[in-house]
Amino acid sequence: MADKYNAETIISETHKKISNAFDVFDHESNKTVDVREIGTIIRSLGCYPSEAELHDIIAELEEEEPTGFVRYERFLPTMTKILLERKFRPITEDLLLQAFEVLDQQKKGYLEPEELNRYLTQEGEPFTQEEVEEMLSAAVDPDKNVILYKDFVSMMTIDDHR
Amino acid sequence: MGCRVTKPNKQQRIERERAIVSVPASHTAVTAMRAALLIQRWYRQYAARLEMRRRCSWNIFQSIEYSGEQDHIKLYNFFGCLMDHFTPASSQKKWISHIFHESDAFQEMELERYFSYKNIEVPDVYSGPHLTFPLTISNVTELVDAFKNKQKLHAHYVMRLLEKTLMLLRFLPNINHVSTCKYKEITICAETPYVFNGDFVDRGKESMEILLVLFAFQLLYPHDVHLNRGNHEDHIVNLRLLQKIFSWLPLVTIIDHKVLILHGGISDKTDLNLIAKLDRQRFVSAFRPMRGEVSVRQLEAERDDGRRRVQSLSYGAGVRLRPEVPRHSLHSASRRDVGSVEEELSERRRLAVLGLTSDQGSAKDLQTEAWRQIVDVLWSDPMPQNGCVPNDVRGGGCYWGPDITQKVLDRHKLQLLIRSHECKQEGYEFCHNRRVLTIFSASNYYDVGSNRGAYLHLGPDHIPHFKPFQASRSTRELTLRQSVGRTERSALQALRMLFFTHKSELMREFLQHDPQHTGLISLRSWVVAMETVLHLSLPWRVLRSQLVSSSHDGMLNYDDWFNQLSIIQPNAKIANTSLLETLYKHHSNLETIFRMIDTDHSGLISFEEFHQTWKLLSSHLQTNISDKAISELAESIDFNKDGSIDINEFMEAFRLVEQSRAERKPSPTSAERTTNKPTTTQNLSDITC
């Protein structure tokens, strides 16, 4: 399909992707979404922004007098630019693994739940209690009660190859 | 943290990121922070993708559910049409009028027959609960325990319980006023009133048990347990007496003259004074035409439009009087035949109560108005914008805005409207400046893990305190990913069933995109076909990747794709495949019609009745189902060859199941495909929708 690489096609495909993702959260079908869902939408389109970056984007998208809603006509150009410029690129499996290895200072090959909990709720852009509980419920090996991070990373990144 | 200063190229970025995490130990603190950041950033993206999937599954279930409700509306419209315009042969005439036009006297007779629990003996071997009336708390506790242990309550006790419930309900007003003040008398019952806001029978497997428990508690604590009617108490159910009970359920409960509780919602026409006065038990079902009255306004609108769009049952452009029906029409004739004098007298009495004369014109108006009030209360949904528009997703009631909430609540000096009717992720949700609260108590509504349920506790200050919960223990043990995965699988399976039941239409649509009959269509065409045939507002482009597993160069072999849906019926005896699809698609409507025909509730219908059903269905669907096809089908279903058909067996025979992988047949080769083609076209012409 030769026209696949045509710029116009790329843009229109991109627009369709953005529109589909937006529509999922457009509950009243009036081309607006709650501002609190913007992060989910952007991330579901394959981007990995930090919380700070997200806040910046939202500030751009909000109306001069914030209504709590974001309109599609504002979202579309901003999101198109993000996608076409490939901002906020994915974190690879390698990188993720290395991050866990850094936290595993004693090089045990695993992390204690309390250890990881501490890092994630006190460092960086801290997780909420709910977030850390959710992650630990998937990460902790039920028999050994530790996080075998190598296995964990492999398992979680299987989805990325879908 | 994020790099915003320059835009490095890919290589530089990777190197930089690598550098961030592989710095020597002396910078541990900083690198630990950066590592944590990376993990957080990654996990939040992962969680967002899961949320997206969950939301999509949700939308799928909701679309299918609402479209199923629309089907019911269409059935209603069909029956209405039937009554007004269908002039059946004399043999059919009697049968149809029998279904639709039972007189009060006939119904009373039936009720007596059903409530004759005295004739139902409880055998000695029965080990379930024995109820005594008036009920005691130990009776009810025993009942609940028995149900928890999967025991059954004997029919004798069921009948008594239902009879007592009906007696109680008849005395209740349409609008139940409840007070949270303590009672002056000392009673041994709970001091807190409980309100159950409708839809008691819906998806769960133990609807009857739940109903009986609710009724038992209501009988035990009649001042403290209040049941409002929901729209699902509307379905034409198997037991006539349950129908009767549902029609007597109050429509509205008001607490301390401040909090309004009803199942669906309101419209700009909602008038509590009118609701208080109407005769609620006449309106057994929004789908069953009222005696002597049918609203054809919407039917006519639909016909004029020529479009398939479903419009609202009740909410339209004002009340239009029905066009004059000639005196010799079907229903007025039969009405005259049966107990007409008594009916007329009671009619006049009723009108007198409502303050009207017995002029025919305004009587009809009032009935229509009363019916509309009820449908609005049971079916409406709130919307964020001001105004009031027909609820075309449900097909009944309206969407009402914050201005309407304010108007109606202020008019009746109420503070808060509590309603249900819509499933909410967390079990509850406020809207309209916190003057409307939706509360939904069935957790795992669409599937295990789909949502939480909630109930609320209203203090004397009328401030709600929420108690969300999730019923299934297994849900709580699943990780987020597992529960999302599960719900998603269910939603996708529900969609596959839908594809299967729309196979002819989809094939027709695919062929449009494949005029050369290559057997292939583009993925884009697949999306267009889905949108055109299914009328579900779903993101087909996104769903495609999960519903279409094998495509080559962007092209899909649609025959293969259908085969891979792997859905067959379990009973291979039922050979006639041209009817099969119709059967699957209209499964629930068929069941509705069958149960209406089975007037003595024996669970059996005769060949003749079976035949009539199909005739009705085919005229509703405007298809052509030959007599021969119906006879063949009937014979193949009559498993014990006794000349009658067991309804339940019939329905069971057509439950869709997923074919196991081992049994799946290989897809036809292109040679086979060519020979199969004539069959395909034959099917298409048999079902000329």
Image (spheres, helix red, strand yellow):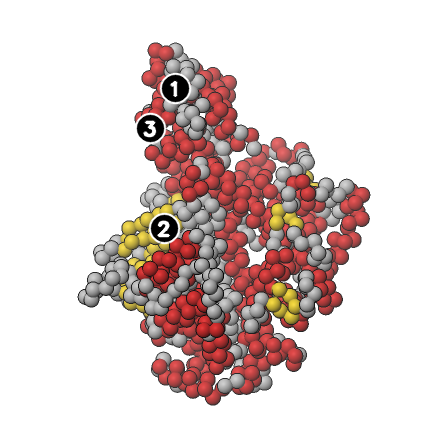
User: Amino acid under label 2?
Assistant: Ala
Q: Chain of mark 1?
A: A
Q: Residues within 10 Å of mark 2 (few under 14, many from 20)?
A: many
From mark 1 to mark 2, how far is it between C-alphas? Answer: 40 Å
Residue in view at x 69 percent, y 60 percent: B579
Residue in view at x 75 percent, y 55 percent: B681
The quarter of the picture where the N terminus of chain B appears is top left
Return the residue at label 2: B454
In the rendered view, does A154 fall on the left or right side of B388?
right
Question: Same chain, marks 1 and 2?
Answer: no
Pick whichever, B16 or A62, lies toward us: B16
From mark 3 to mark 1, how far is it between C-alphas? Answer: 13 Å
Return the residue at label 3: A121
Disc 1 is placed on an element classified as helix
Return the residue at label 1: A103
In the image, residue B679 above or below residue B560: below
Pick whichever, B649 or B252, lies toward us: B649
How far across and how far down the image is residue B224, in percent? Answer: 29, 63
Q: Residues within 10 Å of mark 3 (few under 14, many from 20)?
A: some
How far across and how far down the image is residue A150, in percent? Answer: 47, 22
Q: Which image quadrant for residue B363?
A: bottom left
